[in-house]
Image (cartoon, coloured by chain):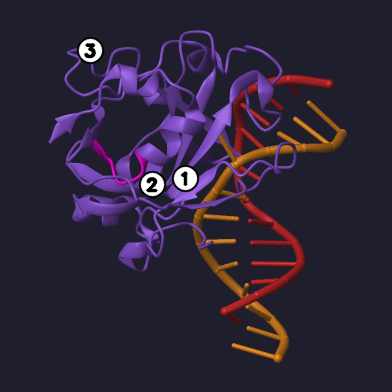
Chain colours: A purple, B red, C orange
Amino acid sequence: MQPVDREFFRRDSRVVAPELLNKLLTRHGRTGRIVEVEAYAGFEDAGSHAYRGQTERTTVMFGPPGHLYVYFIYGMHWCANAVCGDDGHASAILIRALAPTAGLDAMRRARAKARRDRDLCSGPAKLCQALGITGQDNGCDIVAGSGLTGNGGTGGNIQIFDDGTPPPAEPGQGTRIGLSAGAEHPWRWIVPDDPNVSRPD
DNA sequence: ACCGGGATGTTCT
DNA sequence: GAACATCCCGGTG
């Protein structure tokens, strides 16, 4: 288990995103391997929440890398991003799916409607539900071993680890899901053939 | 299997 | 007032 350091996240989100595949996201004993991500690239990206400048909602995106940006969508769902780029760059990576590896019982309780384990974390809002991530976690520090984990959020310990599994040599790549503006950019990456992705491709 | 629509409320125009 | 980085359920084939 190696920590992912802050410099890892300080680079462009489109470079970091495919490297985030196969890392572990964990919170309170519930852990999953990241198998699907999307990059959002700040000012240059019409699909990004940061495109029209900083607002109260997007404040965390404009801050330092290695923090969690959590937003509320469709009146009922939370989604989580890892903030990338240097301070002020406002880029981020939406974590869209996990392959559950630990804390399965707690995840099943948190997602009683999921009938199969592959439905626990196969979407950005599903994995937040499974791990119990909410707006309370917005702004928390996700750099393991920083000694500041949880700083900026009130929800508790969320961390990203590297267990030595490398990212796929040839990840699947395609366009991002659910966007109107910025839908043309191929900034979604998946672990090929993983049954936990929100959609194949 | 696939498709269509409803839920639900914050954010920004 | 419209849009929204979604999910779930109930229809039909």
Of the image marks 2 and 3, the number of the one nearer the N terminus: 2
Horizontal side of A87 relative to A165 (left or right) equals right
Instruction: Kindly report the distance in space between the C-alpha atoms of the residues bearing marks 2 and 3.
Output: 23 Å
Residue A127, label in figure: 2
Residue A154 appears in the rendering: no
The subunit letter for the residue under badge 3 reads A
Location of the N terminus of chain A (image quadrant): top left
Residue drawn where x is 56% and y is 18% of the image? A58
Residue A16 sits in which quadrant? top left
Circle 1 crowding by C-alpha within 10 Å: few under 14, some 14–19, many from 20: many
Residue drawn where x is 16% and y is 20% of the image? A145
Q: Is residue A151 magenta?
A: no
Residue A21 x %, y % = 36, 44
Viewer-nearest residue: B7 or A111: A111
Amino acid bearing label 3: Leu
Instruction: Kindly report the distance in space between the C-alpha atoms of the residues bearing marks 1 and 2.
Output: 6 Å
Q: Which residues are magenta?
A: A20-27
Residue drawn where x is 74% and y is 42% of the image? A180
Amino acid bearing label 2: Leu
Amino acid bearing label 1: Pro
Instruction: Kindly report the distance in space between the C-alpha atoms of the residues bearing marks 1 and 3.
Output: 25 Å
Residue A54 sits in which quadrant? top right
Residue A20 x %, y % = 36, 38
Circle 3 crowding by C-alpha within 10 Å: few under 14, some 14–19, many from 20: few
Residue A176 appears in the rendering: yes
Q: Are marks 1 and 2 in contact (CB under 8 Å)?
A: yes
Residue A124, label in figure: 1
Q: Secondary structure at mark 3?
A: loop
